[in-house]
Amino acid sequence: MKKIFFSLFSALILCNAVLHAQGVKPSPQMKAYIDGLMKKMTLEEKIGQLNLPSAGDITTGQAKSSDIAKKIREGKVGGLFNVKTVAKIKEIQRVAVEESRLKIPLLFGMDVIHGYETVFPIPLGLSCTWNLEAIEQSARIAAIEASADGINWTFSPMVDIARDPRWGRIAEGSGEDPYLGAQIAKAMVMGYQGNLTDNTQILACVKHFALYGAAEAGRDYNTTDMSRVRMFNEYFPPYKAAVDAGVGSVMASFNEVDGIPATANKFLMTEVLRNLWGFKGFVVTDYTGINEMIDHGMGNLQEVSALALQAGIDMDMVGEGFLTTLASSLKEGKVTIQQIDHACRLILEAKYILGLFDNPYKYCNESRAKTDIYTAAHRKIARSIAAESFVLLKNQDDLLPLKKGGTIAVIGPLADNKRNMPGTWSVAANFDNAISVLTGIKEVAGTEANVLYAKGSFLDDDSLFEQRAGMFGKDFSRDGKTKQQLMDEALAVAARADVIIAAVGESSEMSGESSSRTNIDIPRAQKDLLEALLKTGKPVIMVMFTGRPLTIKWESENIPAILNVWFGGSEAGYAIADVLFGDVVPSGKLTSTFPQNIGQVPIYYAHKNTGRPLPEGKWFEKFRSNYLDVSNDPLYPFGYGLSYTTFSYSDVKLSSNKMSKSGKIMASVTVTNTGMLEGKEVVQLYIRDLVGSITRPVKELKGFQKINLKPGESKEVSFTITDEMLKFYNSDLKFVSEPGAFKVFIGGNSRDVKEASFQLY
Ligand code: BGC
């Protein structure tokens, strides 16, 4: 490809500078280049840039492939997604830059959500590490691997706040908290994009803008409706953090907001995203998001395509509404050429910033594909991050960690099930390489231990549910056995064991997209198994797989030890064994509240007080905000997670109990490791604004530090409180702080905290 305006080197320096500022930002050189290119483009070629087909078919079938290749030659494709391997991508890019009239390179996207072939824990699990460096590193490694295979654009991070565990996509985000979600959004954008100067850094796409996680009744794709005050304070912060971190693209969500689908929502796409937040990159729809507006009841394909463009959408994923209708809409005066030009320019700018005009094969280095993917170094990091994501929910009488010896029975439908380990959205994973719990335990325990196995139960008794929840039929096949046969085998194995590890919970397809549940218990068949195992009198450790908080009240009351392992990625089996045997001391903390029962949902720590709060220490009082049948408490609160050691917290010390708006104060505690093992603790800072012009949550996370302490060691942990941390969006949507009384809480979870107070003046 010819270098038209300036050398690769100067382009890269320039890109570096602009990207640091705010995503894909125009520069005079880029503008001149794109002006020149756009002058040569026909209307059809401009509209073609707005088209993003899925090329999944290219990897499998010929027919569709030649159809897409034809469109590429005709300049009717701006980017493709779902192509795997650098060789295929290189060939498709060759068609674009050698056989199309203007030789415009393509974007190649993929859902690289929590790793590429080296798979990290699902995002909900990752967030439980509370380790921003580790999270950034996981995104960095994902970018290194994806880019080595030809990908230059990932549809990640997914930052939708979710407070309803019925919604299966809670697995894909960072949980319920806007502050933590914002920190993670930023870390992931930095990990993927860096400064976008070299061929291991790829364009990120924050999604799903906006409020997708607030689907009514937790049913995927369902309606959302909320006040603007709530949007701005509780749901927008992670999207905004990604924009502030320079994310290059944004994906619109499927749901409606204020009665208008996000895909046609000018308030979201133009007023908030561009005018208020200054986003300079491009906006892509979600999969057929434009076409779905026909079913939303917004008009026919031509009408909804025009609505999307007018709202501020630049690229149409899969549905070809833009491709097939925008020219007519222009002719009929329903859209303007300026609108088409604007969208086209933003996509070309992204390609420019990625360096594709200088070198369309920048991401097509075939030797990197051999050396940089699924490497031993990446797998080692994935194993350690996975271990850090697990949350120890219960550990009665220090049952864990286990000794590497004796006879260990590993029982459960998820025990010998490697294909289930990577979790939802592991599109690039090689499932056959994943490490099951059984393999992990055998290898980490070594020859000292005698490890036995039985499947023990079906995933669920309801075979239809089991089918829907088990994408990989092979691992969940019933092998012609009855429930009783599986149970008998399990009990026979358990009888020979010193300790039982029950690997139970959800299959990976029970959470993720289109995997909502109204009952979030561990499936009945597995509960029956757990009950039978407990009756043996042997110690039972539940290793729980899940993509969401589950209702495990009975389990928490009856099973002595529970380790929640989410879906830990390709190395999960090893990581689980590392924690079970104490090679790694658990340090994960929940980022979404575990309810006692489904009726409490949505339940989250940063709730409002209401006018009739329940007096502290009570679980019911007539005419107060509570239930007759269950207390308001969660089963496990946000921020909760045990260790193999224990920590104590001193009282909170404030450097002053008064703070001016231009000043700051320090809040400190001394944390001591009071147990016998070295361990990590996530020290959490919460603040409550006691009086506001709008009602304020009873607690809001405002900071955290993850510290390491040796047995007996103490550390002082200090947080600086500034006016910025006390601000919120008031009813005029102004970001303000208000003078008055505040409470400061510090502790190891959102419930067990020490507190102090100060006044802002
Ligand atoms: C999902 C997106 C994803 C897209 C492309 C959609 O169904 O909602 O999160 O990026 O598909 O695969």
Image (cartoon, helix red, strand yellow):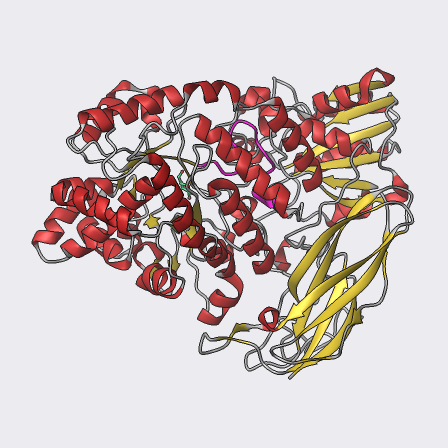
Say which residue appears at 27% left-offset and 56% top-offset.
Answer: 297
> Left or right: 219 with respect to 251?
right
Number of marks drawn: 0
* Quadrant where the image shows the C terminus: bottom right
Q: Foreground: 407 or 265?
A: 265
Residue appearing at x 90%, y 45% in the figure: 711
Quarter of the rendering containing residue 759: bottom right
Looking at the image, residue 278 sits to the left or right of residue 73; the answer is right
Residue 151 position, x and y percent, is 40, 31
Q: Main secondary structure of the magenta part?
A: loop
Residue 87 % position (x, y): 37, 19
Please say if 7 is above or below 479: below
Indicate which quadrant contains ligand 1: top left
Q: Residue furthest left?
A: 331
In the rendered image, residue 121 lying in the magenta stretch gets the answer: yes
Q: Is residue 124 highlighted in magenta?
A: yes
Relative to 596, residue 403 above or below: above
The residue segment tinted magenta is: 111-127
**Nearest to the observer: residue 646 or residue 409:** 646
Query: Residue 187 location, x and y as percent?
Result: 55, 48
- Residue 85 lies, in percent from the top left, at 41, 22
Of the 4 image quadrants, the one containing the N terminus is top left
Determine which quarter of the picture holds residue 183: bottom right
Vertical arrangement, residue 707 with respect to residue 529, above or below: below
Work out whether residue 639 can be spotted. Answer: no
- Asked if residue 728 shows in the view, the reply is yes
